[in-house]
Image (cartoon, grey):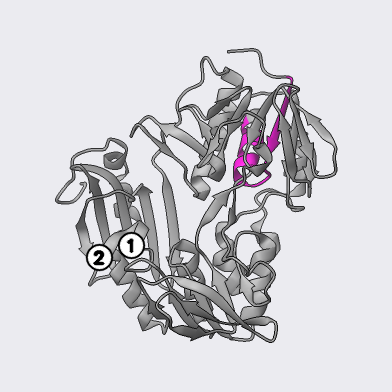
Amino acid sequence: MAAAPSRIAVVGASAAGLSVVEGLRREGYTGSLTLIGEEKHLPYDRPPLSKQLLSGAWETDRLRLRGENDIAALDLQLRLGQPATALDTTAGQVTLGDGSLVGYDALVVATGTRARRLPGTESLPGVHVLRTLEDALALREDLAEQPHLVVVGGGFVGAEVAAVARGLGCEVTLVTDTAQPMGDALGEELGALLRTVHHEHGVRIETGVLVDRVLADGGRASGVRLADGRTLAADVVLVGIGAQPNTEWLTGSGVPVGNGVECDATLYAGSGVWAAGDVACWLNTRTGEPWRIEHRTNAAEQGLAVARNILAGPERATPFAPVPYVWSDQYDLKIQIYGRTRGADEVRVVEGSTAERKLVALYGRNGRTCAAVGINMVRALRGYRAQVAAAAPLLTGSAA
């Protein structure tokens, strides 16, 4: 094992950043650890923002990933509420928003992503995105009046918010440019099932159309204009059109940036810099392709991998090649995905059926399994994880 860096700084205090510092301490690292976060909060869990917190089932205290005593036991220098604004890899220094400098011998970039916005809506009342705790609380407050909500975007966030808003008694219209809600993740057949379920719960869905702009009246959102010229009235608009990596602060640093921080297979970006979480774009040795994944489980797994690889050193670091996992809860559907469905050219339902609303579907690419999706079949789906990991030939029946 290489000599451990005496000072390690982690920029990003969410799931990935927390996983890095916990992993380092668990591996016996006793050096200086600094955890830097733009938000003022201790690390908290983001998936419940669009579900339990938005619905009111949870309050903010249940989102904390660790309590204050657990964080204190890690013996960190915490710099919360301070965004990183610049990086000097030659000097080994991170500049923070207050102008202070944090030195390091190894650096982990775990700054995640931010929600994309529709141009001109950044400060318009009634228009929301959902990425942070404050975002969720602001949206929850607006939904309390049971307004007419228009959701722009039919991905995970958009579909989940639509489901929660219906449960709160809101009138909901979901607009997506795909043929089905969550179509990019689920494909046509399973996406059609999800669309049916949303319809049954009273959600109006407009597919295959873009939103041209948000309309305003009296200084507040009043609706949206679609690209085909139609207008939809709204009291509240939720924009869920994806996220972009937080990498601007790395400009001029020499750290390779494209679709996130560009890393090798071990999550190393060079010059003493590593990356983890939503911001990391790394070479996946299972597929030979660069991947960037915006999933909670991936963030935690990458954080642990980076911790081990920092201590091993770049020469002995091991590739990170997981089977990604993500889930979504909507109404009475539990949707789970192992692998990556994007790019699949074939889908086979191998257990259950869409009619039963209980199934496992395998997704193939060039005849090989690239993903397995389960709807309300938690135990059965686990049996297909190994097939996804091995990129095995597509099955036609049960994994048993």
Left or right for 60, reference 365: right
Q: Report the amino acid beneath label 1.
A: Ile
At mark 2, the secondary structure is helix
Left or right for 143, reference 40: left
10 drawn magenta: yes
Q: Earlier in the sequence, mark 2 or mark 1?
A: 2
Magenta span covers which residues? 6-23
Q: Specify whether residue 76 is in view.
A: no
Report, in whole angstroms, how far the alpha carbon at label 2 lies from the one at label 1. 12 Å
Q: Residue at x 35, y 31 (%)?
A: 288
Q: Residue at x 73, y 41 (%)?
A: 84
Tell me: residue 270, above or below residue 74.
above
At mark 1, the secondary structure is strand
Tell me: residue 200, above or below residue 39.
below
Find residue 379 and report its horizontal and vertical position in percent.
Answer: 33, 54
Q: Nearer the viewer, residue 44 or 124?
A: 124
| Residue 118 picture quarter | bottom right
Q: Are marks 2 and 1 in contact (CB under 8 Å)?
A: no
Mark 2 or 1: the one toward you: 2
Left or right for 374, reference 293: left
Q: Where is mark 1, residue-wise? A: 375
- The residue furthest front is 229
Give the position of the N terminus as an image quadrant. Answer: top right
Q: Report the amino acid beneath label 2.
A: Glu
Find residue 363 and report its horizontal and vertical position in percent.
Answer: 25, 50
Q: Where is mark 2, residue-wise? A: 189
Q: Residue at x 43, y 67 (%)?
A: 154
